[in-house]
Amino acid sequence: MSLDIINEKGVPLDRQTFTWKELAGPPFSKLDDDAFTRVRVILMNGIESEALRFSHACARMNGDLQATLARIRRIEQHQQTLVNWLLPADQSALETTIGFEQVAIEVTASVAQNEPDPYLAQVYRFGMLEDFDHLYRYAALMDRVEGRDANNILQCYTDIRPGRPTSVEHRAPADDLRNPYDRASAGVVSKLNALTITAGEHQTHDYYMTVGPTFADPIARQLYAEIASIEEQHVTQYESLIDPTETWLEKWLLHELCEVYNYWSCLSQEPNPRLKQVWDRFLAYELGHLHAVADLMKNVERRDPAELLPTTLPAPIHYESQRDFVTKVLSDEVGLRANGTQIVPADKEGQQSIEARRILNAEGSPSEIIAEGYRWTPGTELDHRFELLEQGRMM
Amino acid sequence: MTQPEDGTRNRTGIHTAKDAKQAIQGAAEGTPDSARTVEPRRLTEVRGELVREAGSLGTVPRPVTLKGTVKATIQTIKGHSPAVLVDLLAARLAFERTGTRLYDALLIKHEAAHIPPGGPGRDDLELIRDQELRHMGLLSRCLETLGADPTAVTPAADVGGVAGAGLVAVVADPRVTFTQALDAMVIAELADNDAWVTLADLADRLGMDEMAADFREALVEEEDHLARVRAWLNAAITAQAGLSPSPQPPPPEAHKPIS
């Protein structure tokens, strides 16, 4: 399914309207919908959240753009609401967390494979193995505190097993910065990848910071604190991939293009007909935003937006299990660490990061404590405990 | 939807996933038998340490007034802790407030539901709802008698609110059927029954005879709520399963409201 983003003008801004009933419409089914439907909803909430975040930052630095920014931002906020309110009320904060980590693993794995720049691809693989470990820790938490099976959410698309241990992911800030792509020479796919993953990780950080204190269990509270800290590192890492010399309007145009690209990716693979309509509608809305910003670029910067926009969109994000790729990366790269902007073998890691995590882990590591000897089992670890009890092998 | 559907769409179980074998294998490779345990000792130790170190949820507020009648009431329970009674009264009060709202929500579901023979009429639900409201009024008056503030949240009321949050989430969800909501109401009524027994016994032992008598009367109504909600749930499940009604006594007649 190709899309001609130059000639498809989408829906004009003045026809992009909502009612409260639409914004808070019926959610998807936690039980019956495909896990990748949840993955798309979570990611698109993150993409819209980033649209708002960028728009506010841009408005604070560009008085002449404020009116258009405010107009488009209002629509984006309503889009985000409609998307985020697709999450069902029977999905707990911890279940949504499992969904967030599935997004971070499966989407980042797809992006890593779509990324033509080897350095950027390595950064995505590096971050992906860390989120892979977070999933394992949260699954252990869900099982050991609530007696619930994380795979009810994951639906066997994503393995629950250790990645790069969360306890060694804590680094000195300087070791989280990476080299940016070059705005002049990078392909558009590299720009879209960086924006997409930054958006996803940023909302993950914000979500954990919001729901972390709502947990009663003290280890759950510590684990959310620990993993939120790493999500902040990930935001630092991924946003540093974006060329900081892009102009504000260039960044805005790329944000709108990123939204077009992501809704288009969702639309191409969504089996739920009602959600497919949402993705279709918002793709048309984003095309409207893209062209509004393109016109602004012509008028304000006297610059042709066509020099930034591709004639065809890159291959879509693949919403399917990336198990084989993830398993190979796990096998080859779990031992890697970061030193400055470089991904290095463990023995080349800088002393600053080692010292930073020594301090943080000094009173114990929640991610280690919760997952001590944990192996995911269908129906929860308690099935295995029951077997041991029956065999008289429990203490 | 008014009852559970058989379907092929549910994707949560291991047997509907085509990649189940790989998922199980991956988990086993990630945590080999030599490293596996279902008794994480450090987790138990640390949770224990944190329980010992933890503070409390908060305190029971002191009486806000010490007028003559309050002094006389407090005098009755002198030598014992009035705070315990205040805490339990406030917990019941909070629960009855939420209970009233739960029946409000149940009435809305009732409108949209197909009610089988043996199920409640609207007036049945309204009667219980109004009895919960009267219990609320009774408890509020009792707290004032003790000089306590019926608008304050005490620790027991707070715990009850946390425990009851799931019940509200069930009954408020428009996708939850009337029968599924009745299931939650059985939990609410069971907890409510036990709590009224405790409250009446405590009031008795503290020499608060008038309060104890009122609480016993409320308890009779709560027992009636539980019996009726149980019977309605049973009737609904029996009808959904396509069975003839259970040979059990019909739902009891409603108890006359307390004044």
Image (spheres, coloured by chain):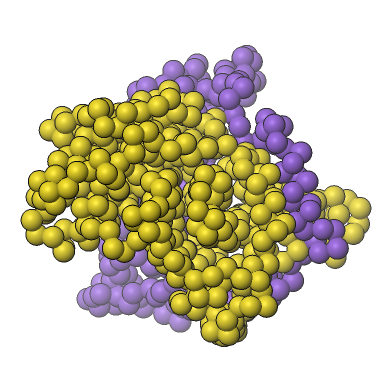
x then y, percent, for residue A380? 70, 49
Q: Is B230 positioned to the left or the right of B120 in the image?
A: right
State the hue of chain A: yellow
Q: Is B9 positioned to the left or the right of A208 in the image?
A: right
Q: Is B200 positioned to the left or the right of B103 in the image?
A: right
x then y, percent, for residue A5? 30, 32
State the hue of chain B: purple
Question: Residue B158 falls in which quadrant of the image?
Answer: bottom left
Q: Give the residue at x 43% y 50%.
A: A190
Name above or below for residue B6 compared with residue A76. Answer: above
Q: Give the residue at x 45% y 28%.
A: A268
Q: Is B162 positioned to the left or the right of A378 in the image?
A: left
Residue A258 seen from this side: yes
The quadrant of the picture occupied by the C terminus of chain B is top left
Q: As rendered, which of A93 and A78 lies closer to the eye?
A: A78
User: Residue extending furthest front?
Assistant: A185
Q: Give the residue at x 22% y 57%.
A: A248
